[in-house]
Amino acid sequence: MTPAKKRATATATAAAPTKAPAARKQTPAKWTDHEVGQPHPAATDPASDSAPLGAHVSIAGGTAEAALRSREIGASAAQIFTKQANRWAERDIEPAEAEAYRAAFADTAVRWQCAHDSYLINLASPDPELRARSIESFRAELRRCHALGLDALVSHPGNYMDERASGLQRNVDGIIEALEAEVGPTRLLMELTAGQGTVLGGTFEEMADLLDRIPAALQSRVGVCLDTAHVWAAGYDLREDFDGVWARFGDTIGFERLGCLHLNDSKAALGSHLDRHELIGEGTIGADPFRRIMTDPRLQRVPRIIETPKGDAPAATDARMLSLLRSFAAGG
Ligand SMILES: [Zn+2]
Ligand SMILES: [Zn+2]
């Protein structure tokens, strides 16, 4: 058993699962520690992040295992699935699992956590049976997030199939029904899509329209997740028109609604409507927009999650991506 595992287990059996995580003994990185030719210490130090930064990590072996994976890559944020994302089968989180999960994360530098919902959910579906099933499944997603005490649930708008306007309203009604039924600490973040086929949420205007239809009483429980690879594929040119894209974002959705950034480069072309993630700096978007995002004062406090390909060495690849982003934040 590793020391990390041993500590996590010990905390999991302690009487007060909600107690504050033990104070970290990490020394803040100093520029003076930096030797020429060596990676800057800030590049691997999660305590140096102005906003939480992390990766989508696997829950193989149990949700608590996500903590060990986040720790291994030096993350200060984490995203998980709370079940198998490509299956309808639902599950609830029992108190023992929630306790073990919280204890395991208390032993990491992670200070912001979200889940991504199942890809099968389609709240905009014109098929009553599929839509009812989607609402049930979406409610179960929210319940699991609340049980784990997650900060956010990231969810894709649905597929309208028949007619855009009625599909958008079905999507909104599904969100309202689920939020009213499942009350808890987790904020719902609707993710901008690549706008492929009949999927909703591929433009800032449509996303703003969707959110504006949610009643005032629920507004504090909803927001937006912007995935760089999705908006690029949707036609927003972060490379040649960085300022224009963010100005349009501010004018339509608004920065106050931005609850999470998914930082992914793209294998697909601008405007292709294809959702194909690539390693940062190695795709069609290139490093520069990410450099700008990491130093933009408007985005300084927004949690960032990478969903980049993990290859044969998931931890090493994710750690390399986080270091790269931190070097951008430090002006590199
Ligand atoms: Zn997504
Ligand atoms: Zn994403």
Image (tube, rainbow, N blue to C red):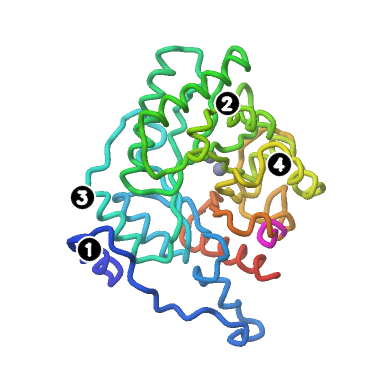
Q: Earlier in the sequence, mark 3 or mark 2?
A: 3
Q: Earlier in the sequence, mark 4 or mark 1?
A: 1
Q: Quadrant of residue 118?
A: top left
- Residue type, mark 3 in image: Ala
Residue beneath disc 1: 9
Give the percent coordinates (x, y) of residue 199: 60, 25
Of all residues, the one furthest to the right in this rendering is: 240
Task: Give the secondary structure at mark 1.
Answer: helix
- Residue type, mark 1 in image: Thr
Disc 4 vs disc 2: which is toward the camera?
A: 2
Residue 213, numbered circle: 2
Residue beneath disc 4: 249
Q: Marks 4 and 1, Cα distance to the nearest angstrom?
A: 44 Å
Considering the whole magenta stretch, tell me its main secondary structure: helix
Task: Give the secondary structure at mark 2.
Answer: loop
Residue beneath disc 3: 96
Task: Give the secondary structure at mark 3.
Answer: helix
